[in-house]
Image (cartoon, rainbow, N blue to C red):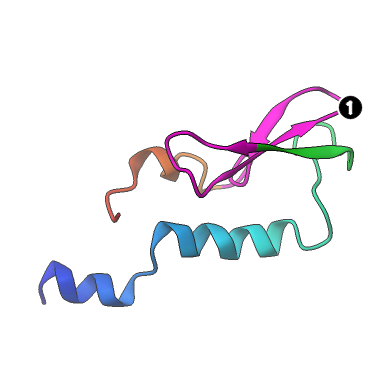
Amino acid sequence: MSVEVYKLFIPKDEECIEIIRKIRWGNGYICPYCGSRDVILKGKEGYKSYIQRYRCNSCKRHFNDLTGTIFYTFIYKSNWS
């Protein structure tokens, strides 16, 4: 099979992030560093504009949809898109 055929069956990065976001934040945003629910949206990641950034008002740290997950390093290595 060609690469084009494989791409038909592999979801795009954007679709994968949306699924992760729904599963992870379904009950509200929680800081992966301190566990606080006092979190605000803080724009998008510059290198992957479909990844949401957040800021914890308790510990003042920034994180994104993938922080603290097994997929965190994937955002830097993706060759599928």
Q: Which residues are magenta?
A: 43-69
From the viewer's perspective, tell me whether residue 18 is left or right of residue 55: left
Query: Magenta includes 57?
Result: yes
Report the number of numbered marks.
1
Q: In the rendering, at what x and y percent does residue 51 appear?
A: 54, 46
The quarter of the picture where residue 2 lies is bottom left
Whether residue 56 is situated above or below residue 75 in the rendered picture: above
Whether residue 4 is situated above or below residue 58 in the rendered picture: below
Q: Amino acid at mark 1?
A: Ser
Q: Residue furthest left?
A: 2
Q: Quadrant of the N terminus?
A: bottom left
The prevailing secondary structure element of the residues shown in magenta is: loop
Residue position marked by numbered label 1 in the rendering: 58
Whether residue 17 is situated above or below residue 70 in the rendered picture: below
**Residue drawn at the location 53% of the way across and 57% of the way down:** 17
**Residue drawn at the location 58% of the way across and 45% of the way down:** 66
Q: Quadrant of the C terminus?
A: bottom left
Dot 1, crowdedness within 10 Å: few (<14), some or many (≥20)?
some
From the viewer's perspective, tell me whether residue 36 is left or right of residue 49: right
Q: In the rendering, at what x and y percent does residue 58 appear?
A: 89, 27
